[in-house]
Image (cartoon, rainbow, N blue to C red):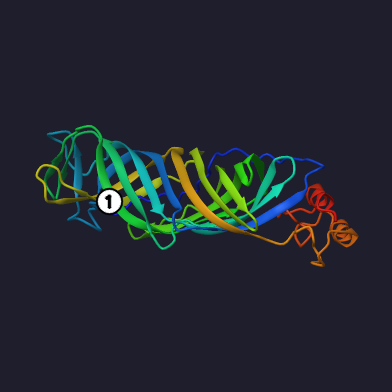
Amino acid sequence: MNPILPTLTLSFAAPVATALVAASVAHAQTFDFTLLPASTVQQTLTLNTPLAGTLIGNYDATTNPTGTRTLPGLFGGSGNQPIPYTSTIRITQSISSNPAGSFSLALLDNNVCSITGFTSDLLNEVPGTVNLDQLLTYSTFRTVNPSSLFPSVGQITIPVGSGSVTEATAVQSAAAIGTAVQASAGTYSVNVAVPVTITISGSVAGQSADPGPLPAVIAFSGTLTVSGSSASLSTTATDNAPVGPLPALPPLENQAVALPTVIPTGGTANLLFSGTFGESNGTSSLNLSLSAAGTEQNNPADINNDGRVDGADLAIVLSAWLETSGPADLNNDGLVDGFDLSIVLGSWD
């Protein structure tokens, strides 16, 4: 059966990370973390696209005189007549693996922390799955060549095809500032919302299944343990959100579909589907359980790496004010501004 494959552009509804402005924020310790093999990820995406119109046999008196003809009802009629239908195109994608990745976490004054540079290979060489099917409802009709009856029995599910997810990555897309509240010596309760862009690609029914860049916010919540220049982080991270509504796709015109016969079984009716798509809606769920090990990095406020945070580092920040990249963008939020100035002033030697 040939698939009916809409071109999908997905958008995850997610809260915007809150920027915390505090003049007294100071750099204390920054750790570079690597995800450990004990980390796990479960991600599912289901998208439903309504489609309604008519189906008709692929018979044509001139070009395909031996093709399938369709007739409404149980008896009577002649020729090749359109049959009304309603349906939903459903795509389901699933990932379950042990992700790889890295990020940096900075402990700042006033129970503030930040996460920068989060990037993760969500698959880590374990492909995900994609399934595509059509939920179809139609009025009773008959076909000729082959001769078969398609009784109206309510909604039927027609498997269209399956495939695999071959790439799935999550990369931080904006600054992530949250809280790190000390519970005991060397132990902190961490809560940070990290904006990311998720990229997924693969194939289904022999065709590309690439929804494009997907914005999301992963909410980290867990425990940070610091021992000298080493640290460990155990956290859960979630993003659960509705998808859509997405704009309707262009109308479907004479999409060839090989439909298995119903009474009797064993044959194939070659039909042409035409119809109009409605808005797509769905759900997305991303759940991470992360275990990471970290080592302390040099103070990023020491921009010129001379072992001190002083006027030379301040001059670098001021000379790069409002630039969008470079070593003076200490919190990696894409702008040299008051956040970066406060890090330098808070780490002043």
The foreground one among 235 and 166 is: 235
Give me the residue at 16% from left, 35% from top: 151
Q: Quadrant of residue 313?
A: bottom right
The percent position of residue 172, horizontal first and vertical second, equals 60, 53
The foreground one among 86 and 186 is: 186
Does 134 sit left or right of 233 as displayed? left
The foreground one among 59 and 191 is: 191
Residue 135 visible at all: yes
The percent position of residue 145, horizontal first and vertical second, equals 14, 50
Which residue is labeled 1 in the image?
A: 257
Residue at the limit of the structure toward the front, as seen here: 185
The percent position of residue 340, horizontal first and vertical second, equals 79, 52
Q: Quadrant of the C terminus?
A: bottom right
The foreground one among 171 and 84 is: 171
Residue 249 visible at all: no
Does 20 sit left or right of 10 as displayed? right
Crowding near the residue tagged with mark 1, few <14, some 14–19, many ≥20 C-alpha atoms within 10 Å:
many
Q: Secondary structure at mark 1?
A: strand
The percent position of residue 199, horizontal first and vertical second, equals 51, 55
Task: Judge whether 214 appears above or below 157 on screen.
Answer: below
Give me the residue at 81% from left, 53% from top: 347
Does 107 sit left or right of 140 as displayed? right
Q: Quadrant of residue 166?
A: bottom left
Total labels: the figure holds 1
Give me the residue at 78% from left, 57% from top: 301
Amino acid type of the residue that numbered disc 1 sits on in the rendered structure: Val
